[in-house]
Image: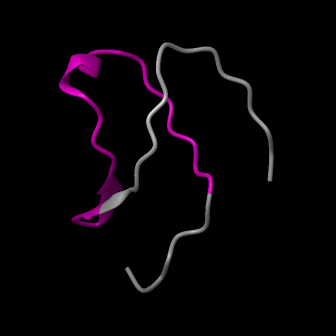
Amino acid sequence: MDRFEIEGEEVLDGTAKPSGNSAHVIVPKRWRGADVKVVHVSEPNPDE
């Protein structure tokens, strides 16, 4: 696994949920319009 160092304001843990042919992660409404980075930290579960 690679290690990344990112400076930011806040960190949230979440799960990417199915959305059509893609996936989405919900973040707080107050983050709207902010630059956001998403880091893949585990392999997806093929049963989900």
Using residue 7 as the reference point, say whether residue 20 is left or right of it.
left
**30 part of magenta stretch:** yes
What segment carries the magenta color?
Answer: 18-41
Using residue 45 as the reference point, say whether residue 21 is left or right of it.
left
Q: Residue at x 50, y 77 (%)?
A: 45
x and y, in percent, of residue 13 in the image: 46, 43
Question: Which quarter shows the C terminus?
Answer: bottom left
x and y, in percent, of residue 38 in the image: 50, 38
Using residue 1 as the reference point, say whether residue 27 is left or right of it.
left
- Quarter where residue 36 is shown: top left
The number of callouts visible is 0
x and y, in percent, of residue 9 in the image: 48, 13
Up the image or down, 40 lies above or below 34; here it is below
Q: Residue at x 60, y 68 (%)?
A: 43
x and y, in percent, of residue 42 in the image: 61, 61
Residue at the limit of the structure toward the right, as seen here: 2
Using residue 20 as the reference point, say whether residue 4 is left or right of it.
right
Q: Residue at x 19, y 25 (%)?
A: 29
